[in-house]
Image (tube, helix red, strand yellow):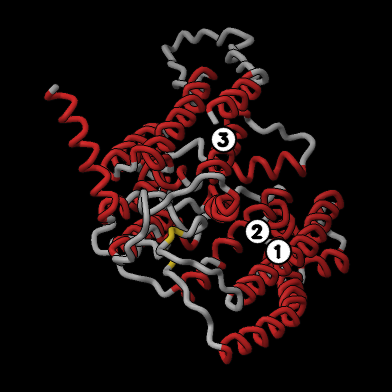
Amino acid sequence: MTRIACTAMFTLALAVPCLGAGSEMRFPPPEFESGYQFPETARPPTARPVVHEYIDVALLAVVLLLASYLILQRRSRRAIFALMIAALLYFGFWRDGCICPIGAIQNVTLTAFDSTYAIPLAAAAFFVIPLAFTLFHGRIFCGAACPLGAIQDVVLIHPLRVPHWLESGLRLLAYTYLGAGVLFAAIGGTFLICRYDPFVGFFRMTGNWNILILGASLLAIGLFVGRPYCRFLCPYGVILRNLSRLSKRRVTITPTECITCRLCEDACPFGAIRTPTEDWPEGEYQIAKRRLAFFLVLLPILIAAGGWGGYALKERLARMHPRVRTAERVFLEETGQVTGTTNASDAFRTTGQASAMLYQDATAIRSRFALGGALLGGFVGLVAGGKLIALSVRRRRAEYEADPADCLACGRCYQYCPKEQERRKQRRDARSGRGNR
């Protein structure tokens, strides 16, 4: 795994472009005899040196390597929590929550759809490296490296259990958010995920009041519901949870055999512990088979309905694009109207008073949102149908297990497992025995 991470970072490092030097004034200012003083020129903040981006990428790799050891080998909740706090302080408050793998989804998308855009390689590294570690070790990025997850984990004081069916339904919001973020980044409207990042205002100690209220609300909910943003809204978490199903190594609750004490189930605040299963009665098995057949037939209907709904929202989605809003304002000014139109595209055709180039640009953007909205709606319908189908599929389990997709690798279950405590006692006794000799 170390070889993979180092190879990825070395490859990315080869192409990081150098930053240009700042420009200087071409002509000297005139000299006034009246004693006039030129006002101080406002200058944008100096860009961070490229070496700082190397440091960020290197630190991310180091944190993930250390997290892999602490979560899968050391199995220590205290050590995991300490690393999580360190990641929160550096990647969150010190680096202002940026660069972030969650927001990097949009950079990657824009690179794929816009040939004139070149993704910052630090953003590419932050997007790819956690995915690589997840593929081999599970969601260790969520457990110890993500500042957005850490700030929620810190405030959790009295976790309440969320029913599995409700959690699965709420997670549809995260899939919708991911699809919308990709759609707007692909069309070039806005970086929706970064725009509505709920915690960046706290990291930067400033920001839009609406976003600060959103973040405060999520933290208030997080006092009783474990990591609500991570579980129900995070678009990067959607990618990680599905990729973690393929992970070669993952969190195991007990180091040896499970004694079915259920202490791990009570300790997990995320509902990620799956209980042992029993054989289905014949009657329930037949009901599940009929339900599965019904949902399979329903799946294409949900996809078509979602696609139609997304297409119907094309005008509202398009108005979130700055060029479309500008075109509509130009149209209203030229026609002397003060209120919007129900269909700005038709209004442009009938009046012909707006700028032709601006009209053509807005029309093209609307067409892309019509197609993109249909695809987004179809994607949401597909996910919803897949969740319904999953209700009729039952995997056999002989003991309590951490679900690889839902487990956030926080290490809380380690503290409560009697077999884990027994293993630690044996290790302490072995160390003390060596010390006595």
Where does residue 204 sit, x and y in percent of width and height? 38, 40
- Residue 251 position within the rendered picture, expressed as x and y whole percent measured from the top left: 43, 49
Q: Quick check: can you spot residue 233?
A: yes
- Graded by Cα atoms within 10 Å as few (under 14), some (14 to 19) or many (20 or more), the crowding at tag 1 reads many
Q: Which residue is mark 2?
A: 179
Q: Amino acid at mark 3?
A: Ile
Q: Say which residue label 3 marks.
A: 129
Residue at 43% in and 52% down = 408
- Residue at x 59%, y 13% (from the top left corner): 21
The crowding category of the residue bearing disc 3, from other C-alpha atoms within 10 Å (few below 14, some 14 to 19, many at least 20), is many
Q: Is 247 situated left or right of 296 in this image?
A: left
Give the SS element for disc 1: helix
Q: Tell me which numbered mark, 1 or 2, is placed earlier along the sequence.
A: 2
- How far apart marks 1 and 2 lie (CA) works out to 6 Å
Alpha-carbon span between mark 3 and mark 2: 22 Å
Observer-side mark, 1 or 3, equals: 3
Which numbered disc, 1 or 3, marks the residue that appears first in the sequence? 3
Checking the image for residue 376, the label placed there is 1
Whether pointer 1 and pointer 2 mark residues with C-beta atoms closer than 8 Å, the reply is yes
Query: In the structure shown, which secondary structural element does the residue marked by tag 2 occupy?
Result: helix
Q: Nearer the viewer, mark 3 or mark 2?
A: 3
Q: Is residue 342 visible?
A: no
Q: Which x, y percent locates residue 309? A: 71, 75
Query: Upstream in the sequence, badge 3 or badge 2?
Result: 3
Distance from disc 1 to disc 3, alpha carbons, whole Å, reads 27 Å
